[in-house]
Image (cartoon, rainbow, N blue to C red):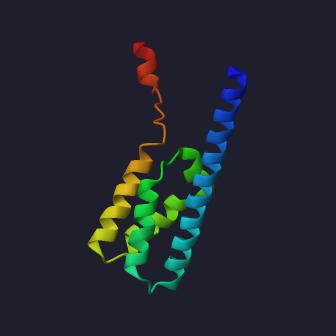
């Protein structure tokens, strides 16, 4: 019985992850079409960014959906300070998901 419960929980988590990825992908496509229009309703963009803000994001979702590129484009192009701030907050939060890679220099190796 425990095995079955664990399997159901895993299947639920996978299904939930797929649904969230689909939501993120859909929002990303909407942002892309808004970016192409160049003349857009800022309220719609704000709603989409707030929806992204409410979704739990993973590095895998960001890589697969590439929504970060769309959000960063909005951040760069907007004249609206609220949109710029919201976009910047999202990008900063998502950058924290990227693992930090440390490299050792030859000088560090000599000291060890």
Nearest the camera: 101 or 90?
A: 90
The residue shown at (46%, 26%) is 104
Is any atom of residue 41 visible in this view? yes
Of 97 and 52, the residue lying toward us: 52
Q: Is residue 63 above or below residue 7?
A: below
Q: Is residue 93 above or below residue 47?
A: above
Splitting the image into 4 quarters, where does residue 51 fall?
bottom left
Instruction: Say if residue 72 shows up in the picture.
Output: no
Please state the horizontal and vertical placement of residue 4, each as a whole percent of the image. 72, 27
Residue at image location 44% in from the left, 87% down from the top: 39
Give how far across and how far down residue 6 sits, in percent.
Answer: 66, 27
**How many marks can you see?**
0
Point 47% across, 30% down: residue: 103
Residue, far top: 112
Q: Position of residue 72 (x, y in %)?
A: 44, 64
Q: Tell me if residue 31 comes above or below residue 9 in the rendering.
A: below
Q: Quadrant of the N terminus?
A: top right
Task: Indicate whether 34 appears above or below 69.
Answer: below
Across and down, in percent, residue 14 comes to: 66, 42
With 65 as the anchor, is 110 left or right in this view?
left
Name which quarter of the figure residue 73 lies in: bottom left
Residue farthest to the front, as pictured:
1
Quadrant containing the C terminus is top left
Q: Residue furthest left?
A: 81
Q: Please indicate whether residue 41 sits to the left or right of residue 84 in the image.
A: right
């Amino acid at each position: 019985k425990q095995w079955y419960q664990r399997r159901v929980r895993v299947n639920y988590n996978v299904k939930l992850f797929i649904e969230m990825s689909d939501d993120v992908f859909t929002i990303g496509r909407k942002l892309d079409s808004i970016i192409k229009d160049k003349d857009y309703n800022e309220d719609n963009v704000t709603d989409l960014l707030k929806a992204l803000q409410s979704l739990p994001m993973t590095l895998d979702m960001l890589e697969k959906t590439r929504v970060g590129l769309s959000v960063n484009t909005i951040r760069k192009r907007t004249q609206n300070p609220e949109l710029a701030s919201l976009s910047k907050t999202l990008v900063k939060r998502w950058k924290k998901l990227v693992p930090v890679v440390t490299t050792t220099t030859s000088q560090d190796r000599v000291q060890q």
